[in-house]
Image (cartoon, coloured by chain):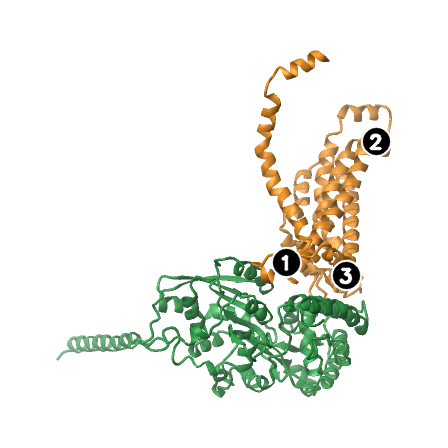
C-alpha cells in the first residue's frame, strides 16, 4: 500500500466519521419536546384567533418580550398576539374607555393592583374560577398554589364584603404577572469602606442615610420617589406600613392624621434632606436613575428594580450591590403591588385569552421570563436555592414575602381620587409648603367627603 | 331708497339661496362645536363616574360648582392659571415684538436665522416638556451644570414650590415667543414704505418712528396675537403635565391639568365638565377684555 492510498483511506474515514457524528448531532436537535401540559392538552383549540394584549413598558413585561414567550405561544397555539405596550400611568384611561364599550378590543390586560377593585366591582373584568375549573382550558399541572399567595390576593382577589381583600363573596379576577414586594438594595462598596451595618430598623436607616450624606463624598443616602400625587402617596405607604400608619381605620374613617402618619412624613423629610437634590420632585424613573448612576447608596422600594440594578447596560453600580430586607419599625410589613393580568368582560376571545394568561404564568414560562430579567411570582422560583448564586435577591425575597402585606393600601374603587389628593398633601409637606400636621389636616375633610359620597361612612 | 328695496326683492330666492349655501358649513359647525359645548354644560350638573359609564348620569344641580369653589386646590389652580397666562402673554408679546423689531431688516444670513428661530414652535409639546424636564433636572440638568461653574445651585427648579411656576413660564416663553415674533414681523412688513419714507424725510428718529408709525400700524396684530396666546395658554396641558404633573403640591396645577386629573384620575366626568365650563367662562371674559381693548386701540 503506497502513501497515496493511505492518505486517500484516511480522508475517506475522516469524511465518514464527520458524516456520522454530524448526523448524530442533527438527530439530537430534532428531538421534539412535549408542550407544557403534555400532548393530551389541546393548545390549538383556538387556532387562527387574534388576541390584543395591553401591557406596560415595565421591567417584567420587557423581560417577557425579550424572552420571546409571546412568539412561542403563537407557535404553540396558532393564536396571533397583538402587543399594545404603553406607559403604565396612561394605561388606566385607555383600559376604562375600552372596557366601557359593548365590545372591546382588549382580550388580556395588565392592571396595576390599585385598579383591581374598580374593574371587578364595575363588572369590567371576568371572574376566573370558571376558566380554572374547566379541564379543557386549564392544565392539570398548572400548580396554582405555587403562585405567591400575597401576590394572588393583592392582584386577583376582589368583589367580596371586604371589597379588595379576601373574604366572603370574593372571587379571583386576575393572576400575578409583574407583581412585587419591597426590599432594600444598597451599595456594598460604600457600606464596606465606611464600616456601615445594613440597617434593620427605620431608626438605623435614618442614621445610615445621614452618615452617608455627611461623610461619603458625592454620595447621597436614600433615593425615594416623592413627586406630587401618586408617587408621593406610594412612598408614604411604603414607609407608613412599618411605622404602623394607615390611610383608614377599621370603620373607613381617615387615619392619616395619626402620630404614626406624621412620624412617617417626618422620616421622609429627613430622607429628602439626605437625598439627591430635588428628590421631592422625583418620579419612579428618577428614583431609579439616582441609584443606577451611583448618586444614592440606598434604594428601598419595589423589588422589580433588582433586574435593572444588576444590569451592566443600565447600572453603573451593578457589580457592587447587596440586597436586604425592608427595615422594620413598629411592624415588619412590606409592600405588595405591581401588576396582574385579567380578561376584560367585553373580550370576544376570553377562552383564547385565558390560554395566553395561563401560558404566561406557567412555571417553565415564568422561569424563562425571570432569566430574561423579569420578576418571579412563583414560590418554587423564589425558593430555588440553585438560583441564589446568580440571583441573590431571591434569597432575600423568599424571606421578605413572609411579611408582604396584601392589605398594604386600601384598593377601593375610589382609591385613584384619594391617592391623588393624599399625594398632593404629602408632597406639600415634603417641600415645606405646609407642615406635615397642616397638610394632613387640610386633606382630611376632602378625603372624608369622598368616603361619604361613596357611602362608606355617614 | 325705495328703488333699491324694489331691486333687492326683485331677485327672488337670493336671500334663501345664501342660507342654503351656508347651511352645510353652519350645520357642521353646530354639530362639532356647539353640541359638545352644550353637552359639557349639561353634564356639569350631573354626577357621572368613569367607573360606571354604562349607567346614566345622576342630576345633582349646582353641587359640582359648590364643591369646586369650596376646594382649596381648585381655587389655587385658578390663581395659578391666571398668573401663568398673564405672565406668558405679557413677556412673549414684549420679547416677540422686540425681536421682530431687531430682525425686521434684511441682512446676510437673516433667512436662516429666522428659520432656526421658529423651530421651537414646530417641536411636539411632549418633547418640549420632557426636554425642559431634563434641562431642569437637579442632578443631570444642563442648567444646574452651567450654574455650578459660577458656584450657584443646585436648584430644584421643578421641585421647589417657589421656583416651579417660574420655570414652567420660562419653558412656555421659549416655545411661543417665536410665534409672536412671526406675527409681529409679518405686521411690520405691512407698514407702508411711503409712510416710512415720508417720516425719514421729516427727520424722525427711530423711537419716534416706532411710537407714532410702527406700533400703531401693528396694534391690531398685537391684539389678535395676545388673544390667541391667551386662549392657548389657558388651555396649556401637555408641556406642563410632562414637566411637573402639576406639582410640587399644586403649585403648577393649571386648570387644564386639574380638569384632566378630575376626569381621568378621580374619574368624575360631571365635576370635570364643571371645571371645563368655568375654564371656558374665564377664557371668554379675559379674551373679550383683550379684544375690546385692541379694537379700541385700532379705532383710535
Q: Name the residue under label 3.
A: B71
Residue B75 appears left or right of A418: right
Q: Mark 2 lies on which chain?
A: B
Depicted A425 relative to depicted A246: above or below: above
Disc number lying in front (3 or 1) = 1
Q: Which chain is depicted green?
A: A
Which mark sits nearer the N-terminus, 3 or 1?
1
Depicted A288 relative to depicted B258: above or below: below
Depicted A55 relative to depicted B96: above or below: below
Residue A426 appears left or right of B126: right
Disc number lying in front (2 or 3) = 3
Mark 3 crowd level (few <14, some 14–19, many ≥20, 10 Å Cα)? few
Q: Is residue A277 visible?
A: no
Same subunit, labels 2 and 3: the answer reads yes
Expressed as whole percent of the image width and height from the top left, the position of residue B292 reads 80, 37
Expressed as whole percent of the image width and height from the top left, the position of residue A134 reads 39, 75
Q: What is the display colour for chain B?
A: orange
Amino acid at each position: 500500500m503506497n502513501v497515496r492510498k493511505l492518505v486517500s483511506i484516511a480522508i475517506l474515514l475522516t469524511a465518514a466519521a464527520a458524516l456520522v457524528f454530524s448526523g448524530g448531532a442533527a438527530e439530537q436537535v430534532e428531538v421534539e419536546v412535549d408542550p407544557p401540559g403534555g400532548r393530551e392538552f389541546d393548545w390549538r383549540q383556538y387556532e387562527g384567533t387574534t388576541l390584543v394584549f395591553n401591557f406596560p413598558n415595565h421591567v417584567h413585561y420587557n423581560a417577557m418580550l425579550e424572552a420571546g414567550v409571546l412568539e412561542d405561544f403563537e407557535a404553540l397555539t396558532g393564536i396571533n398576539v397583538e402587543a399594545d405596550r404603553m406607559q403604565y400611568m396612561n394605561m388606566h384611561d385607555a383600559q376604562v374607555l375600552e372596557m366601557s364599550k359593548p365590545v372591546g378590543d382588549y382580550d388580556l390586560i395588565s392592571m396595576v393592583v390599585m385598579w383591581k377593585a374598580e374593574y371587578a366591582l364595575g363588572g369590567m373584568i371576568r371572574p376566573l374560577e370558571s376558566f380554572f375549573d374547566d379541564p379543557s382550558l386549564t392544565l392539570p399541572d398548572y400548580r396554582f398554589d405555587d403562585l405567591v399567595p400575597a401576590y394572588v390576593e393583592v392582584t386577583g382577589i376582589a368583589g367580596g364584603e371586604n371589597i379588595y381583600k379576601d373574604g366572603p363573596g370574593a372571587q379571583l379576577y386576575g393572576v400575578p404577572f409583574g407583581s412585587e414586594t419591597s426590599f432594600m438594595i444598597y451599595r456594598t462598596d460604600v457600606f464596606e469602606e465606611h464600616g456601615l451595618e445594613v440597617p434593620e430598623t427605620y431608626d438605623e436607616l435614618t442614621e445610615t442615610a445621614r452618615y452617608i450624606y455627611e461623610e461619603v463624598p458625592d454620595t447621597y443616602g436614600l433615593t425615594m420617589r416623592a413627586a406630587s400625587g401618586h408617587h408621593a402617596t406610594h412612598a408614604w405607604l411604603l414607609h407608613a406600613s412599618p411605622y404602623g400608619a394607615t390611610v383608614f381605620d377599621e370603620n373607613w374613617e381617615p387615619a392619616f392624621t395619626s402620630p404614626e402618619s406624621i412620624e412617617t412624613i417626618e422620616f421622609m423629610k429627613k430622607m429628602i434632606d439626605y437625598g439627591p437634590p430635588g428628590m421631592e420632585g422625583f418620579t419612579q424613573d428618577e428614583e431609579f436613575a439616582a441609584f443606577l448612576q451611583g448618586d444614592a447608596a440606598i434604594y428601598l422600594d419595589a423589588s422589580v428594580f433588582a433586574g435593572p440594578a444588576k444590569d451592566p447596560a443600565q447600572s453603573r453600580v451593578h457589580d457592587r450591590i447587596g440586597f436586604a430586607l425592608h427595615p422594620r419599625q413598629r411592624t415588619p410589613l412590606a409592600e405588595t403591588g405591581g401588576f396582574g393580568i385579567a380578561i376584560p368582560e367585553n373580550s370576544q376571545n376570553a377562552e383564547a385569552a385565558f390560554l395566553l394568561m395561563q401560558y404566561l404564568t406557567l412555571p417553565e414560562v415564568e422561569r424563562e421570563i425571570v432569566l430574561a430579567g423579569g420578576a418571579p411570582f412563583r414560590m418554587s422560583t423564589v425558593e430555588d436555592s440553585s438560583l441564589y448564586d446568580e440571583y441573590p435577591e431571591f434569597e432575600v425575597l423568599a424571606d421578605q414575602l413572609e411579611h408582604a402585606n396584601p392589605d398594604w393600601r386600601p384598593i377601593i374603587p375610589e382609591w385613584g381620587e384619594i391617592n391623588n389628593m393624599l399625594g398632593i398633601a404629602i408632597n406639600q409637606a415634603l417641600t415645606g409648603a405646609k407642615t406635615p400636621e397642616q397638610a394632613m389636616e387640610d386633606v382630611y375633610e376632602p378625603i372624608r367627603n369622598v368616603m361619604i359620597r361613596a357611602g362608606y361612612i355617614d | 331708497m325705495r328703488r333699491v328695496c324694489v331691486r333687492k326683492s326683485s331677485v327672488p330666492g337670493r336671500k334663501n339661496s345664501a342660507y342654503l349655501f351656508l347651511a352645510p358649513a353652519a350645520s357642521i359647525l353646530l354639530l362639532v362645536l356647539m353640541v359638545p359645548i352644550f353637552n359639557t354644560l349639561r353634564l356639569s350638573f350631573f354626577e357621572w363616574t368613569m367607573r360606571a359609564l354604562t349607567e346614566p348620569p345622576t342630576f345633582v344641580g349646582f353641587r359640582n360648582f359648590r364643591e369646586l369653589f369650596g376646594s382649596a386646590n381648585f381655587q389655587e389652580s385658578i390663581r395659578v392659571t391666571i398668573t401663568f397666562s398673564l405672565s406668558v402673554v405679557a413677556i412673549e408679546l414684549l420679547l416677540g415684538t422686540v425681536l421682530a423689531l431687531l430682525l425686521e431688516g434684511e441682512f446676510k444670513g437673516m433667512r436662516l436665522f429666522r428659520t432656526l428661530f421658529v423651530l421651537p414652535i414646530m417641536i411636539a409639546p411632549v418633547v418640549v416638556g420632557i426636554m425642559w424636564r431634563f434641562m431642569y433636572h437637579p442632578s443631570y440638568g444642563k442648567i444646574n451644570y452651567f450654574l455650578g461653574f459660577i458656584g450657584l445651585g443646585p436648584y430644584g427648579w421643578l421641585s421647589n414650590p417657589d421656583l416651579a411656576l417660574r420655570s414652567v413660564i420660562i419653558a412656555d416663553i421659549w416655545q411661543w415667543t417665536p410665534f409672536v415674533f412671526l406675527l409681529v414681523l409679518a405686521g411690520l412688513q405691512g407698514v407702508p414704505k411711503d409712510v416710512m419714507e415720508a417720516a425719514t424725510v421729516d427727520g424722525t428718529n427711530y423711537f419716534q418712528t416706532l411710537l407714532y408709525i410702527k406700533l400703531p400700524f401693528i396694534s391690531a396684530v398685537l391684539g389678535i396675537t395676545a388673544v390667541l396666546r391667551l386662549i392657548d395658554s389657558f388651555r396649556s396641558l401637555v408641556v406642563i403635565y410632562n414637566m411637573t404633573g402639576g406639582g410640587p403640591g399644586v403649585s403648577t396645577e393649571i386648570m387644564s391639568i386639574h380638569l384632566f386629573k378630575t376626569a381621568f384620575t378621580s374619574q368624575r366626568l360631571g365635576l370635570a365638565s364643571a371645571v371645563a365650563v368655568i375654564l371656558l367662562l374665564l377664557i371668554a371674559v379675559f379674551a373679550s377684555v383683550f379684544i375690546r381693548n385692541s379694537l379700541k386701540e385700532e379705532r383710535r
